[in-house]
Image: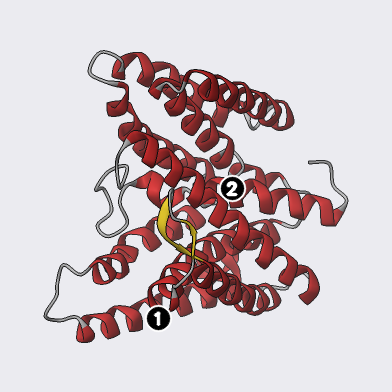
Amino acid sequence: MQALLSLLGTEILTALGMLYLMLGMASLGVGLKLRARPQSRLRLQVNAWWAIFPVVTLSLLLHPAGAPLLALLIGVLALRELAPFAGQGGAVRFTWPAGATLAATITLIFLKPQAIALALAIAILITLVYFLWLRSTVSLLWLLWLMLCFGVSFLPRYDMLPLAPHQRLAWLFYLYVLTALNDVAQFISGTLFGRHRIAPGISPNKTWQGLLGGVAATLLLSLALGSYLHLAPARQLAGYAVLLSLGGFCGDLMFSAAKRVLGVKDFSHLIPGHGGMLDRVDSLVVTAPLLYFLITYAQGMPA
């Protein structure tokens, strides 16, 4: 217990405990309300967080190795989802260079983080132009893969911020919590109040009411969690909340557009109620680098 206190600090441990308590209450409430519908999507989604939260918690406990390990885990599971779309003959030709790209990214990010981020950004831009020109499935798969590598490569970079070790971990915890609960708030708000669709041709379930509900919930959470962890002034936390909520929504929308092109509803059925790994981390792909750049800009640090 003393080791946990020294690693995470009482604030993060208390916040973690509150999150698990909230999850337990949500599971109990949904279970009682939907006890006659064990396969309800909402019930499956809530129960799936009992598998997702411990993985994120473990990555925090294994700090500083936890962030790169989590990035590798996300990448490996996402690669398994993308490879079948390359076709029977193309799966191997996609898997090996894609796996090598991920391994090189996670390894070199500790040596030349700015150079790797710039190289990936250029590669994403070139691949996007190539996809818009040819509209080929393989170019779309590489576009999604490079975006994923770019996004998850920022998880280890939080430990490179010139801040106290405890503060670096607190920012990473803040990222995970806001990204996850923004998705949940948007889904619940859209389900309860959704009337006006944002992009019906891409994702019919995305509504303005869901987006605004997610922004409002994320704003409150950012102010509460950020103030409790002593991360930044209230005005700064409010700005971060709005930008992260919008960024997460954009990430979700981009991957939804890709699924439309691929002709699937979910990338896989790995996580009951959520779809696949890519369905779960589509927001994180945007919010991880976005929050990193916001922190470095606010602190006057080189990105």
Numbered mark located on residue 96 in the image: none
Quadrant housing residue 141: top left
SS at mark 2 in the image: helix
**Is residue 220 among the parts visible in the rendering?**
yes
| Circle nearer the viewer, 2 or 1 | 2
**Relative to residue 246, is residue 93 drawn left or right?**
left
Marks 1 and 2: in contact by CB < 8 Å? no
Report the residue marked by disc 2: 286
Q: How crowded is mark 1: few (under 14 residues within 10 Å), some or many (20 or more)?
A: few
Q: How crowded is mark 2: few (under 14 residues within 10 Å), some or many (20 or more)?
A: many
Indicate the position of residue 104 as horizontal and vertical percent values: 54, 23
Labels 2 and 1: the sequence-earlier one: 1
Please say which color scheme the image uses.
secondary structure
Report the residue marked by disc 1: 21
Which one is in front, 224 or 68? 224
> Which residue is at a point 49% across and 70% down the rendered structure image?
210
**Relative to residue 3, is residue 161 drawn left or right?**
right
Q: What residue type is labelled 2?
A: Val
